[in-house]
Amino acid sequence: GVKTLLLVSHSFSHFTIHHHHLLSSHSSTMMAPLRLLFLGALSYWQVECINAFLTPSSSTRHLPYYGVNEIISTNPSSLLRAAETGGWAGGKNAAPAIMCEVDNIPILDPVPDGYKRLFLVRHGEVINPGGDRPVFYGAMDVSLSQLGEMEAIEAGSYLAKYHLQHVASSPLSRAKFGARQVLARQPLEGSSATGNNDSNDIQIFEGFRELDRGAWCGLTLDEIGLDKMARFDACDESVTPAEGGESYPTLKTRVLAARDELLGMTDAGRACAVVSHLQVTRAVLSDALGMDANEMAGLKIATASVTCVDYSEDGEAAVVRFQSFKPECGLEDSKDGAN
């Protein structure tokens, strides 16, 4: 607590000194009233931040994205809001996702007693192997675009403060790149964090590989057929593509086995992350929400987005904290068509 107070006070002091220098560079006496007003306002906000820290309040919340915990203590209705329904979890196990109006980020409480936390990260934008002709690629090892790499870095930065015990990955290169960005931003061994990563490298799980599209790889949606794809999404096993293609139920079985293995390695009260794919994330999320496999295709999961699920230690309960959160960092929108 004292450390947070000092960090916030130091940040404001540095800001005050820096801008005092800028304003003092004007020798005109006309700048004096403006300078006094500016510095007075900064001092006021310093005091308000310290008072907010020292005054217990249910509206004081710690924000998860920045290196220094920023403190909000004001009318919570003006700064906190429930997440929009579009793209956010709405199943029976979904907790209401609370967002900060100032920075549009989820407000996430510590891992509850007797629970483990799993962050599901989708890889960034890829270079579609069909070029201008977007084709399905599934478990093919396609490369990230330059934008996709930047998206992955931002996702890793967002997770930097959560002190992950394990960082897992699909065996495909687009996911491994993202997982290494997450791991690289975790606290170093021996830091003051409450816990550090148990490994010096990411942990590869074959079960987190993307859905195998089999004979549909390299084909567009029109070439596959809208009706056939609709039947596939509805889990009609008779249209599962040949040449090793997988159905959603088959995918979900292997993905959940990998999830259980990862959670089994994770201590109660700790968090872990897996960087994987669209359909893999859908498989885990749909299970947490109590949805059947034939409802998976309707779950929206953006590229390089983060989904958070808390699991009870006995595996009997799951609570979805938020779905498909993507840090707003000024990047262009990704292209996310066939996959």
Image (cartoon, rainbow, N blue to C red):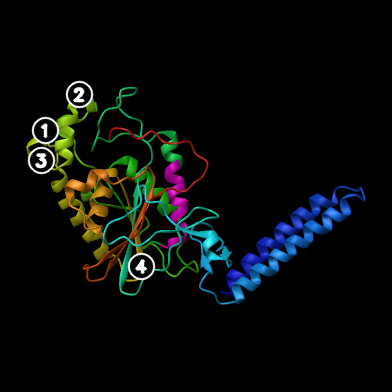
The residue carrying mark 1 is 243
Q: Earlier in the sequence, mark 3 or mark 2?
A: 2
Q: CA distance from mark 1 to mark 2?
A: 17 Å
Q: Are marks 1 and 2 in contact (CB under 8 Å)?
A: no
CA separation in Å, label 1 and label 3? 17 Å
**The residue under label 1 is which amino acid type?**
Glu
Instruction: Give the structural element (helix, strand or loop) at label 1.
Output: loop
Label 3: how many Cα within 10 Å (few below 14, some 14–19, many 20+): some
Residue occupied by mark 4: 270
In this view, the residue in front, 129 or 297, is 297
Q: Which residue is mark 2?
A: 223
Q: As shown in the figure, which amino acid type bears the numbered disc 4?
A: Arg
Q: Residue furthest right?
A: 29
Q: Does residue 225 lie above or below 161 as drawn?
A: above
Res. 67 image quadrant = bottom right
Image quarter of residue 123: top left
Q: Which residues are magenta?
A: 151-163
Element marked by disc 2: helix
Q: Position of residue 140 (x, y in %)?
A: 24, 35
Query: What crowding class fits label 4: few (fewer than 14 Cα within 10 Å), some (14-19), or many (20 or more)?
Result: many
User: Within the magenta stretch, is there residue 248?
Assistant: no
